[in-house]
Image (tube, helix red, strand yellow):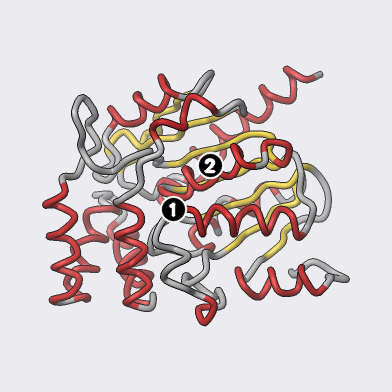
Amino acid sequence: MPAPDTTPVQTRSIALHHLMFLGEAGRPMVFCHGFGMDQTLWRHLAPRYADRHRVVLMDHVGSGASDTAAYRRDRYTTLEGYIQDVLSVLEAFDLREVVFVGHSVSAMVGLEASLRAPERFHSLIMLGASPRYLVDEDYPGGLTGRDVEDLLTGFDLNREAWADQMARQAAANPGRPELAQEVKRAFLAAEPSILRQFARTTFAVDVRSDLGACRHPVLLLQSREDPIVPVAVSEYLKEAIPGARLHFLETSGHFAQLSAPDEVGQAMDLFLDRLERRHD
């Protein structure tokens, strides 16, 4: 349900990001989706926190039910536009001590936002996160530059075939073939030019140099078999982010919030409960 008695700035923010609110009290918890998806990605996970948190669900501009007309390519050529959007939502509703839950590239959006406005954040939960998707010297990112160009070429040649292949790879889960179909539908529902630009923006990300500046508690959640983010990348994040905790999930694919929401929720609960006990 939308927030009651909104100001004009809040009303605009709700429309821009199709903001949805669950719960009315408690520490804010903001859920942010990654490339090609929208807030429905969290439907099995977010409601479980509505009795303890003020849950906020958002769509990136150009995704889901956001105001696609507001999308400007120059703003979203890098992560900076997405970072500023998150900060704008937090400012519009004066959200502080936020638990930020980011999937895939949005995990890094949350990290960068927390460096810009640390007073608004409590902790970061990163699901399937990567600070850089491309391999580099002594860094096992997972993809090469040629892989990315082939991916974009496939998108241009046959978007439906691309969506099918990409979804089968990203949501690979032998026991849950319907997950790949859901991801494929999301890819095909997105506006093509925006989706393509989001892909290029995502695969150009490199925030490795900023990881050591993080001062908030961080939980890294990683599927043991994720074709998008190798295990070595999660281990790299654990070493690079001060005090970060890494928890491996007994599921496969890049969308653990769909394939194993209970396991993800249990890991989140343990992390947040530990933080609360630490402050008691």
Give the residue drawn at x 14%, y 68%. Answer: 154
Location of the C terminus by quadrant is top right
Which amino acid, by three-letter code, is at mark 1? Leu
- Identify the mark at residue 72; answer none if there is no mark: none
Q: Is residue 220 above or below residue 13?
A: above
- 3 or 151, nearer to the observer: 151
- 173 or 82, nearer to the observer: 82
Q: Is residue 60 above or below residue 127?
A: below
Q: Is residue 269 above or below residue 1?
A: above
Which label lies toward us, 1 or 2? 2
- 240 or 223, nearer to the observer: 240
Residue carrying label 2: 112
Image coordinates of residue 141 in percent, x first then y, are 25, 37
Image coordinates of residue 122 in percent, x first then y, are 69, 35
Image coordinates of residue 33 in percent, x first then y, are 49, 56
User: How crowded is the residue under tag 1: few (<14 C-alpha within 10 Å), some, or many (20+)?
Assistant: many
Q: Secondary structure at mark 1?
A: helix
- Write down the quadrant of residue 217 in the picture: top right
Extreme residue in the front direction: 74
Which amino acid, by three-letter code, is at mark 2? Glu
- 251 or 58, nearer to the observer: 58
- Identify the mark at residue 258; answer none if there is no mark: 1
Extreme residue in the bottom direction: 69
Task: State which tag comes first along the sequence, 1 or 2.
Answer: 2
Q: Is residue 156 above or below residue 146?
A: below
C-alpha separation, residue under disc 1 versus residue under disc 2: 25 Å
The mark tally for this picture is 2
Q: Secondary structure at mark 2?
A: helix
